[in-house]
Amino acid sequence: MMRPPSSTTDRLEAFSDGVIAIAITLLILEIHVPPARQGHLLDALAHQWPSYVAFVLSFVTIGIMWVSHHSMFERIAAVDRKLLFINLLLLMGIGFLPFPTSLMATYVREGGTNSHIAAAIYSSTLVAIGIAFSGMWLHMARRPWLLAPGVPLERMQIAFKRSLVGPGLYLLTVGLAFISAPACFVAYALISLYFAAGPSSKVVTPADPAELDPDEAA
Amino acid sequence: MMRPPSSTTDRLEAFSDGVIAIAITLLILEIHVPPARQGHLLDALAHQWPSYVAFVLSFVTIGIMWVSHHSMFERIAAVDRKLLFINLLLLMGIGFLPFPTSLMATYVREGGTNSHIAAAIYSSTLVAIGIAFSGMWLHMARRPWLLAPGVPLERMQIAFKRSLVGPGLYLLTVGLAFISAPACFVAYALISLYFAAGPSSKVVTPADPAELDPDEAA
Amino acid sequence: MMRPPSSTTDRLEAFSDGVIAIAITLLILEIHVPPARQGHLLDALAHQWPSYVAFVLSFVTIGIMWVSHHSMFERIAAVDRKLLFINLLLLMGIGFLPFPTSLMATYVREGGTNSHIAAAIYSSTLVAIGIAFSGMWLHMARRPWLLAPGVPLERMQIAFKRSLVGPGLYLLTVGLAFISAPACFVAYALISLYFAAGPSSKVVTPADPAELDPDEAA
Amino acid sequence: MMRPPSSTTDRLEAFSDGVIAIAITLLILEIHVPPARQGHLLDALAHQWPSYVAFVLSFVTIGIMWVSHHSMFERIAAVDRKLLFINLLLLMGIGFLPFPTSLMATYVREGGTNSHIAAAIYSSTLVAIGIAFSGMWLHMARRPWLLAPGVPLERMQIAFKRSLVGPGLYLLTVGLAFISAPACFVAYALISLYFAAGPSSKVVTPADPAELDPDEAA
């Protein structure tokens, strides 16, 4: 009759998974059915190519963030209030991403200053999310009592350092945004490929979380 | 082949988490991509600053509500029909919040009566949600058979009393709304900070739910 | 390393909970911020009262459906393909409800034939959902091997019969719709009250699912 | 205090379930309340029949995809990085479906080239999703260490071969799209019926995943 004590850590991961799943699925609402005269639908659809590119890039980016987030929570056994709120900031960044995605899709084709602004805002959002990720790793690297049993503190410190690569790369694209917005599309795709790569045959469900490769921290 | 009996309490918390996660993520749909002439996107984006402020405030407010809701459910071992329906009212309030958020974002900059009305409706929604929270605590404080083992009834009575602080503070902002809507923004931020504060290094996953600090009831 | 075998029944309930949680939370998207001249926001908001009524009614109705759905799944230990698809039809009805809600909100104030049509469509959707619920009870009442251990088949037959009350009552409101749409609002509220009522102090998490009151089948 | 190690496989299935549940429920947002003069609401609603047909077809199609996805995950005990990303592509396809659904609903009635294009895009999306499904089966059929205990590799090879039927059938509808878009509606319905059929009285929660009928792989 009494339920087993539910874990705040599990609940927090489930709640975060929910927000991430909703944000990733809401992206499609930013792609609109274009009006088209008879026989011109294909042109009208082709015309809004930045919408599809932005959809795919944001979908893959959020998908990789889910992998990173889950990978992080595999090392967490308990959460404190501060971690709860850094995680909320992280979710706010991910929940905000559909807006810059739509902004990018609308203004990239136009070129000029507007496209630079749109790309810079998209890049800045990714920088902010990356900083929140790094903040979570740093927080854990200093609080061994929050870690899952058997996870050595040094691993977390390495994970924190590696987690800085993401926001660092995205910071470079803020600069790139003021040169060319379409170039940013290419850069986001390359960064996603970089994160998606890694030993692809490696089983991601290890018997022992301590054995996880720190590469996954990124 | 037979599954373990699922707990209504767990299911109710998961369902509530779902509604809260969706409400928090739908907030972004209220921020629209503004039309802008070439070179004027930054101005157009800056112009809709209340949208971003309202997004952040509502996101953080709902996030804190999730923490409170989970914290409450850690003390619940069983639910009765009445608790089920108070919880439904609570979810209705949270699910309604994207509307006053959008109302606030639209009318706060305009100033005058319209901005006062918008802020008063936003504040009233938060009062209503707070009352639903207090109603749940009160309900539990009177029904020891619903509580998790080891949770003393006195703790619940203290939690109920402390839970009145939230709707009390938000009631004051209903008054403030008729003086200044932007001042309400500041007030909401301060109230969120008040709730987010507390012993931030404290581990939120205690071994024994009875040991939880009644401060978290707010 | 190997995960425990996941239960299709649990997964199906979780998936259904997800759809129900999303449908209930999407309802708010049908309430729009009205344009209003300075000082006329309250009038503009009051003008769209049917939107709020429709929101509350649909929210409570879907909330009660969640309770019924969960209550039903407490008696299910296994699912077959047919149950899977009756459940999908049920979810389709619930997922469709935001549309008649919006239809009702738009046309009820106008009165005349349009309001009758809108109300009749809303009522018909509820009849269809109710039939799907009854279909699930009937399916289970004939297949003891799908039931949780200790749940007697006679209880399911009683539950099936009682489950016919819902679509029956809603069928009456299809007729009422052609007399008065606002009267339907009152009828929906009364039907919800009828379902929400019952022994409210009763603990809904019983030790033994077989002891559950067949009243909850409705 | 320490939570049990959470399984990446379980989390991935829960995340996928979330995305699928959201995509299926967002479909209703594509059905709009039509403007109608007094007494003409029924005509206006009847006029947008393709919206309802597209809603029902996509709802059932995604529902069947959920069944297939869950059925697949019952054989998975561990995931590797590559499976993670094939699954992400699969989710992207499902998350994209609301757009071609809306496209189809808008252009099918108009006839001519535009309706052919819309139907071809809808069909192509289903082909892409089907290929992603087959990709997952193929990946598993070659990696016995990812399979649940007792699932023979030969079953997975059969499952992979059978999974090619889906994209094969949908590929035929790409061709059909250029003859008649409404005919595609009929074809999608027949394909769904084909997948929904099968031994409907069969219990889908077997004691032993190895005993599952390979028919369910489709």
Image: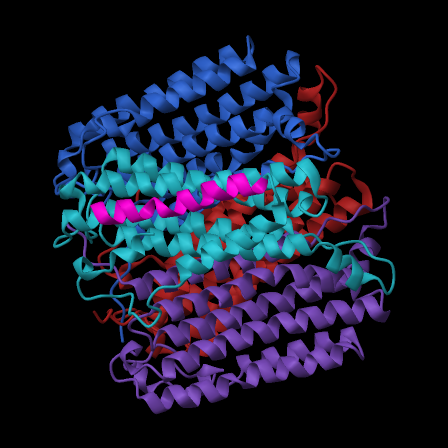
Chain colours: A purple, B cyan, C blue, D red
Q: Relative to residue B138, is residue D43 depicted above or below?
A: above
Q: Is residue C130 part of the magenta span, yes or no?
A: no
Q: Can you give x and y, in whole percent of width and height, for residue C213 in the image?
A: 18, 29
Taking depth in this image into account, of B158 and B55 the one nearest to the observer is: B158
Q: Is residue D167 visible?
A: no
Task: Check the image and name the residue furthest to the top.
Answer: C179
Q: Can you give x and y, in whole percent of width and height, for residue C169 in the image?
A: 39, 16
Residues rendered magenta in the picture: B157-177
Q: Is the N terminus of chain C in the top left, top right, bottom left or bottom right quadrant?
A: bottom left
Q: Can you give x and y, in whole percent of width and height, for residue D82 in the image?
A: 48, 77
Taking depth in this image into account, of D141 and D94 the one nearest to the observer is: D94
The quarter of the picture where residue C39 lies is top right
Q: Is residue B173 part of the magenta span, yes or no?
A: yes
Per the picture, the main secondary structure of the magenta-coloured stretch is helix
Q: Is the C terminus of chain C in the top left, top right, bottom left or bottom right quadrant?
A: top left
Q: Can you give x and y, in whole percent of width and height, for residue C168 in the image?
A: 38, 17
For the point 21% across and 45% down, the residue is B157
Q: Relative to residue B68, is residue C94 depicted above or below?
A: above
- From the viewer's perspective, is C138 left or right of C107? left
